[in-house]
Image (cartoon, rainbow, N blue to C red):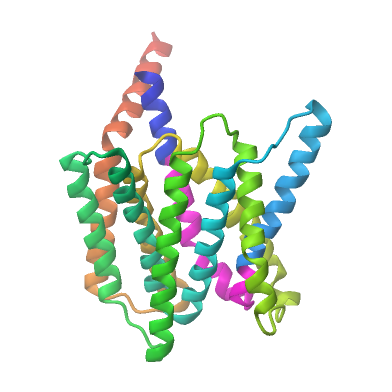
Amino acid sequence: MQHRESAHTRGLLAAVMAAFLMGSLCIFIRESHCSAQLCSFARFGVGFLFIGVVAAVLKFCNGSSLRFSPGAFASGVSIGLCILFYYQALRSTSASIAALLPATGPLLAAVWESLLEKHLPPRRDMILLVTAGLGILLVTWFASDDKPGDQNAFGIMCGMLCGLFYSFYIVLSRFMHAEVTMLRRLFWQSAAGTLALVGPLCAADNVFQGWQTGWPWLLGIGLLQGVGVLTLVAFAMRRLTSLEFAIVSCLEPTEATFLGWLVYAEIILPGQWLGFFLVLFTIVAKSQRHLKWRISCFIARHITHRA
Protein backbone atom coordinates (compact mmCIF):
# COMPACT_ATOMS: atom_id res chain seq x y z
CA MET A 1 0.00 0.00 0.00
CA GLN A 2 2.78 2.41 0.96
CA HIS A 3 4.68 1.63 -2.24
CA ARG A 4 1.55 2.28 -4.33
CA GLU A 5 0.87 5.60 -2.58
CA SER A 6 4.50 6.67 -3.00
CA ALA A 7 4.47 5.79 -6.71
CA HIS A 8 1.19 7.67 -7.18
CA THR A 9 2.63 10.76 -5.48
CA ARG A 10 5.70 10.69 -7.72
CA GLY A 11 3.40 10.37 -10.72
CA LEU A 12 1.44 13.46 -9.65
CA LEU A 13 4.67 15.41 -9.19
CA ALA A 14 5.91 14.38 -12.64
CA ALA A 15 2.58 15.42 -14.22
CA VAL A 16 2.74 18.82 -12.50
CA MET A 17 6.31 19.38 -13.72
CA ALA A 18 5.33 18.38 -17.28
CA ALA A 19 2.39 20.81 -17.20
CA PHE A 20 4.64 23.65 -16.03
CA LEU A 21 7.19 22.95 -18.77
CA MET A 22 4.50 22.86 -21.45
CA GLY A 23 2.86 26.00 -20.05
CA SER A 24 6.13 27.91 -20.47
CA LEU A 25 6.37 26.86 -24.12
CA CYS A 26 4.67 30.06 -25.28
CA ILE A 27 7.74 32.06 -24.22
CA PHE A 28 10.16 29.81 -26.12
CA ILE A 29 8.03 29.95 -29.27
CA ARG A 30 7.59 33.69 -29.32
CA GLU A 31 11.13 34.58 -28.31
CA SER A 32 12.68 32.30 -30.92
CA HIS A 33 10.96 34.21 -33.78
CA CYS A 34 11.21 31.01 -35.83
CA SER A 35 8.51 29.34 -37.89
CA ALA A 36 6.07 26.92 -36.28
CA GLN A 37 7.40 24.13 -38.46
CA LEU A 38 11.00 24.69 -37.39
CA CYS A 39 10.06 24.95 -33.71
CA SER A 40 8.05 21.75 -33.82
CA PHE A 41 10.79 19.92 -35.71
CA ALA A 42 13.41 21.12 -33.18
CA ARG A 43 11.29 19.79 -30.31
CA PHE A 44 11.71 16.25 -31.62
CA GLY A 45 14.83 16.50 -33.77
CA VAL A 46 17.06 17.79 -30.97
CA GLY A 47 15.57 15.26 -28.57
CA PHE A 48 16.06 12.42 -31.04
CA LEU A 49 19.74 13.28 -31.45
CA PHE A 50 20.23 13.51 -27.68
CA ILE A 51 18.43 10.24 -26.95
CA GLY A 52 20.21 8.58 -29.87
CA VAL A 53 23.59 9.46 -28.36
CA VAL A 54 22.50 8.10 -24.96
CA ALA A 55 21.23 4.91 -26.59
CA ALA A 56 24.48 4.47 -28.54
CA VAL A 57 26.54 4.85 -25.36
CA LEU A 58 24.39 2.30 -23.51
CA LYS A 59 24.59 -0.07 -26.48
CA PHE A 60 28.37 0.18 -26.43
CA CYS A 61 28.60 -0.25 -22.65
CA ASN A 62 26.14 -3.06 -21.92
CA GLY A 63 24.70 -4.10 -25.28
CA SER A 64 21.14 -2.91 -24.49
CA SER A 65 18.74 -3.10 -27.44
CA LEU A 66 16.12 -0.61 -28.62
CA ARG A 67 14.05 -2.88 -30.84
CA PHE A 68 11.08 -1.38 -32.62
CA SER A 69 7.95 -0.62 -30.55
CA PRO A 70 4.75 -0.05 -32.61
CA GLY A 71 2.98 1.55 -29.66
CA ALA A 72 5.79 4.00 -28.99
CA PHE A 73 6.07 4.85 -32.69
CA ALA A 74 2.30 5.46 -33.04
CA SER A 75 2.25 7.66 -29.94
CA GLY A 76 5.25 9.57 -31.33
CA VAL A 77 3.40 10.34 -34.56
CA SER A 78 0.41 11.55 -32.52
CA ILE A 79 2.45 13.86 -30.28
CA GLY A 80 4.42 15.14 -33.29
CA LEU A 81 1.25 16.27 -35.07
CA CYS A 82 -0.09 17.59 -31.77
CA ILE A 83 2.94 19.84 -31.30
CA LEU A 84 2.81 21.09 -34.89
CA PHE A 85 -0.81 22.20 -34.51
CA TYR A 86 -0.02 23.71 -31.09
CA TYR A 87 2.74 25.89 -32.52
CA GLN A 88 0.43 27.00 -35.33
CA ALA A 89 -2.20 27.92 -32.74
CA LEU A 90 0.32 29.94 -30.72
CA ARG A 91 1.17 31.93 -33.85
CA SER A 92 -2.46 32.63 -34.72
CA THR A 93 -4.25 33.33 -31.44
CA SER A 94 -3.64 34.39 -27.84
CA ALA A 95 -1.56 32.28 -25.43
CA SER A 96 -4.59 31.48 -23.29
CA ILE A 97 -6.71 30.13 -26.16
CA ALA A 98 -3.77 28.30 -27.73
CA ALA A 99 -3.07 26.57 -24.42
CA LEU A 100 -6.70 25.87 -23.54
CA LEU A 101 -7.66 23.86 -26.61
CA PRO A 102 -4.77 21.35 -26.34
CA ALA A 103 -5.68 20.97 -22.67
CA THR A 104 -8.89 19.31 -23.83
CA GLY A 105 -6.69 16.42 -25.01
CA PRO A 106 -6.31 14.84 -21.56
CA LEU A 107 -10.04 15.35 -20.97
CA LEU A 108 -10.81 13.51 -24.21
CA ALA A 109 -8.31 10.82 -23.26
CA ALA A 110 -10.21 10.24 -20.02
CA VAL A 111 -13.36 9.69 -22.08
CA TRP A 112 -11.58 7.32 -24.50
CA GLU A 113 -10.17 5.35 -21.57
CA SER A 114 -13.58 5.02 -19.94
CA LEU A 115 -15.04 3.76 -23.22
CA LEU A 116 -12.21 1.26 -23.71
CA GLU A 117 -12.46 -0.07 -20.16
CA LYS A 118 -16.30 0.07 -20.18
CA HIS A 119 -16.73 1.74 -16.80
CA LEU A 120 -17.38 5.24 -15.48
CA PRO A 121 -14.86 7.09 -13.26
CA PRO A 122 -15.76 7.76 -9.59
CA ARG A 123 -18.34 10.51 -9.06
CA ARG A 124 -15.88 12.66 -7.07
CA ASP A 125 -13.37 12.58 -9.93
CA MET A 126 -16.05 13.47 -12.45
CA ILE A 127 -17.06 16.50 -10.36
CA LEU A 128 -13.42 17.60 -10.14
CA LEU A 129 -13.01 17.11 -13.88
CA VAL A 130 -16.08 19.23 -14.65
CA THR A 131 -14.83 21.91 -12.23
CA ALA A 132 -11.41 21.96 -13.91
CA GLY A 133 -13.06 22.15 -17.32
CA LEU A 134 -15.17 25.10 -16.14
CA GLY A 135 -11.99 26.78 -14.91
CA ILE A 136 -10.15 26.56 -18.21
CA LEU A 137 -13.35 27.58 -20.01
CA LEU A 138 -13.46 30.77 -17.92
CA VAL A 139 -9.79 31.40 -18.62
CA THR A 140 -10.56 31.40 -22.34
CA TRP A 141 -14.07 32.86 -22.39
CA PHE A 142 -12.90 36.16 -20.92
CA ALA A 143 -9.64 36.24 -22.89
CA SER A 144 -8.86 39.49 -24.64
CA ASP A 145 -7.82 38.73 -28.21
CA ASP A 146 -6.68 41.33 -30.74
CA LYS A 147 -5.98 38.89 -33.59
CA PRO A 148 -7.86 39.25 -36.91
CA GLY A 149 -10.99 37.11 -37.21
CA ASP A 150 -9.70 34.69 -39.88
CA GLN A 151 -6.36 34.28 -38.15
CA ASN A 152 -8.04 33.65 -34.81
CA ALA A 153 -10.40 31.06 -36.34
CA PHE A 154 -7.42 29.26 -37.90
CA GLY A 155 -5.68 29.23 -34.50
CA ILE A 156 -8.78 27.77 -32.82
CA MET A 157 -9.02 25.03 -35.47
CA CYS A 158 -5.33 24.16 -34.98
CA GLY A 159 -5.83 24.07 -31.22
CA MET A 160 -8.75 21.65 -31.55
CA LEU A 161 -6.70 19.33 -33.77
CA CYS A 162 -3.85 19.56 -31.28
CA GLY A 163 -6.15 18.44 -28.46
CA LEU A 164 -7.42 15.51 -30.54
CA PHE A 165 -3.93 14.18 -31.32
CA TYR A 166 -2.86 14.82 -27.72
CA SER A 167 -5.68 12.55 -26.52
CA PHE A 168 -4.49 9.79 -28.89
CA TYR A 169 -0.96 10.14 -27.51
CA ILE A 170 -2.12 9.82 -23.89
CA VAL A 171 -4.28 6.76 -24.53
CA LEU A 172 -1.50 5.04 -26.48
CA SER A 173 0.97 5.82 -23.68
CA ARG A 174 -1.41 4.55 -21.02
CA PHE A 175 -1.93 1.18 -22.70
CA MET A 176 1.63 0.67 -23.93
CA HIS A 177 3.16 -2.67 -22.97
CA ALA A 178 4.86 -2.57 -19.57
CA GLU A 179 7.99 -4.26 -20.95
CA VAL A 180 8.78 -1.22 -23.12
CA THR A 181 11.57 0.56 -21.22
CA MET A 182 11.64 4.33 -20.76
CA LEU A 183 14.61 4.80 -23.09
CA ARG A 184 13.08 2.59 -25.78
CA ARG A 185 9.81 4.49 -25.54
CA LEU A 186 11.48 7.91 -25.77
CA PHE A 187 13.70 6.84 -28.66
CA TRP A 188 10.87 5.65 -30.88
CA GLN A 189 8.54 8.49 -29.87
CA SER A 190 11.21 11.04 -30.78
CA ALA A 191 12.00 9.21 -34.03
CA ALA A 192 8.33 9.09 -35.04
CA GLY A 193 7.74 12.72 -34.07
CA THR A 194 10.74 13.80 -36.13
CA LEU A 195 9.64 11.81 -39.19
CA ALA A 196 6.06 13.10 -38.90
CA LEU A 197 7.33 16.68 -39.07
CA VAL A 198 9.78 16.32 -41.99
CA GLY A 199 6.98 16.85 -44.54
CA PRO A 200 5.58 20.07 -43.01
CA LEU A 201 9.15 21.35 -42.57
CA CYS A 202 10.01 20.80 -46.25
CA ALA A 203 6.70 22.23 -47.49
CA ALA A 204 6.95 25.53 -45.58
CA ASP A 205 8.35 28.73 -47.11
CA ASN A 206 11.28 30.50 -45.44
CA VAL A 207 11.25 27.77 -42.82
CA PHE A 208 14.78 28.48 -41.54
CA GLN A 209 14.29 32.22 -41.23
CA GLY A 210 15.50 33.52 -37.86
CA TRP A 211 17.32 30.38 -36.75
CA GLN A 212 20.65 32.24 -36.44
CA THR A 213 19.37 34.26 -33.48
CA GLY A 214 16.71 31.81 -32.29
CA TRP A 215 18.82 28.65 -32.03
CA PRO A 216 19.26 28.83 -28.21
CA TRP A 217 15.48 28.85 -27.84
CA LEU A 218 15.19 25.97 -30.33
CA LEU A 219 17.74 24.02 -28.28
CA GLY A 220 15.71 24.71 -25.14
CA ILE A 221 12.54 23.52 -26.89
CA GLY A 222 14.24 20.27 -27.85
CA LEU A 223 15.75 19.49 -24.44
CA LEU A 224 13.12 20.89 -22.04
CA GLN A 225 9.82 20.63 -23.90
CA GLY A 226 11.06 17.66 -25.93
CA VAL A 227 13.10 15.21 -23.88
CA GLY A 228 12.00 16.64 -20.53
CA VAL A 229 8.25 16.61 -21.14
CA LEU A 230 8.24 13.22 -22.89
CA THR A 231 10.14 11.67 -19.98
CA LEU A 232 7.89 13.22 -17.33
CA VAL A 233 4.68 12.28 -19.17
CA ALA A 234 5.87 8.70 -19.71
CA PHE A 235 6.74 8.46 -16.00
CA ALA A 236 3.40 9.94 -14.92
CA MET A 237 1.23 7.88 -17.25
CA ARG A 238 2.54 4.65 -15.75
CA ARG A 239 1.34 5.76 -12.31
CA LEU A 240 -1.80 7.82 -13.01
CA THR A 241 -5.10 7.27 -14.76
CA SER A 242 -5.99 9.42 -17.76
CA LEU A 243 -8.53 11.25 -15.60
CA GLU A 244 -5.94 12.14 -12.97
CA PHE A 245 -3.52 13.29 -15.65
CA ALA A 246 -6.29 15.35 -17.26
CA ILE A 247 -6.98 17.22 -14.03
CA VAL A 248 -3.31 18.05 -13.44
CA SER A 249 -2.86 19.07 -17.09
CA CYS A 250 -5.27 21.95 -16.51
CA LEU A 251 -2.27 23.73 -15.00
CA GLU A 252 -0.85 24.16 -18.49
CA PRO A 253 -3.34 26.69 -19.93
CA THR A 254 -3.48 28.41 -16.55
CA GLU A 255 0.27 28.99 -16.52
CA ALA A 256 0.36 29.97 -20.21
CA THR A 257 -2.31 32.62 -19.64
CA PHE A 258 -0.50 33.92 -16.57
CA LEU A 259 2.79 34.12 -18.48
CA GLY A 260 1.01 35.89 -21.34
CA TRP A 261 -0.11 38.51 -18.80
CA LEU A 262 3.23 38.70 -16.99
CA VAL A 263 5.60 38.71 -19.97
CA TYR A 264 3.56 40.00 -22.92
CA ALA A 265 1.05 42.23 -21.10
CA GLU A 266 -1.98 40.24 -22.27
CA ILE A 267 -5.04 41.30 -20.30
CA ILE A 268 -6.42 39.00 -17.59
CA LEU A 269 -9.98 39.79 -16.53
CA PRO A 270 -11.68 38.85 -13.21
CA GLY A 271 -13.43 35.89 -14.83
CA GLN A 272 -10.05 34.45 -15.80
CA TRP A 273 -8.74 34.81 -12.25
CA LEU A 274 -11.79 32.84 -11.11
CA GLY A 275 -10.86 30.17 -13.67
CA PHE A 276 -7.33 30.04 -12.24
CA PHE A 277 -8.75 29.49 -8.77
CA LEU A 278 -11.02 26.66 -9.92
CA VAL A 279 -8.18 24.87 -11.71
CA LEU A 280 -5.84 25.11 -8.73
CA PHE A 281 -8.64 24.04 -6.39
CA THR A 282 -9.33 20.85 -8.36
CA ILE A 283 -5.65 19.91 -8.48
CA VAL A 284 -5.21 20.43 -4.73
CA ALA A 285 -8.46 18.55 -4.03
CA LYS A 286 -7.34 15.64 -6.20
CA SER A 287 -3.89 15.39 -4.66
CA GLN A 288 -4.66 16.27 -1.01
CA ARG A 289 -4.99 12.63 0.09
CA HIS A 290 -1.56 11.81 -1.29
CA LEU A 291 -0.06 15.03 0.10
CA LYS A 292 -1.41 14.16 3.55
CA TRP A 293 0.16 10.71 3.23
CA ARG A 294 3.57 12.21 2.36
CA ILE A 295 3.38 14.70 5.22
CA SER A 296 2.41 11.98 7.72
CA CYS A 297 5.35 9.83 6.52
CA PHE A 298 7.73 12.77 6.95
CA ILE A 299 6.45 13.47 10.49
CA ALA A 300 6.69 9.79 11.41
CA ARG A 301 10.30 9.57 10.19
CA HIS A 302 11.18 12.75 12.04
CA ILE A 303 9.66 11.49 15.30
CA THR A 304 11.36 8.09 14.91
CA HIS A 305 14.72 9.75 14.25
CA ARG A 306 14.43 11.95 17.34
CA ALA A 307 13.39 8.98 19.47
Depicted 154 relative to depicted 228: above or below = below
Depicted 119 relative to depicted 140: above or below = above
**Quarter of the rendering occupied by the C terminus:** top left
- The reply to whether residue 116 is visible in this rendering is yes
- The reply to whether residue 220 is visible in this rendering is no
Q: Would you say the magenta stretch is mainly helix, strand or loop?
A: helix
Between 47 and 79, the residue placed more toward the observer is 79
| Position of residue 71 measured from the top left corner of the image (x, y, whole percent) | 54, 43
- Start and end of the magenta stretch? 13-39
Residue 161 counted in the magenta span = no
| Position of residue 264 measured from the top left corner of the image (x, y, whole percent) | 46, 77
Residue 152 lies in what quarter of the image? Answer: bottom left
Residue 217 lies in what quarter of the image? Answer: bottom right
Between 115 and 54, the residue placed more toward the observer is 115
In the picture, measured across the screen, residue 162 lies left or right of residue 294, that is right
**Quarter of the rendering occupied by the N terminus:** top left
Q: Residue at x 22, y 62 (%)?
A: 134
Q: Residue at x 30, y 47 (%)?
A: 283
Residue 193 lies in what quarter of the image? Answer: bottom right
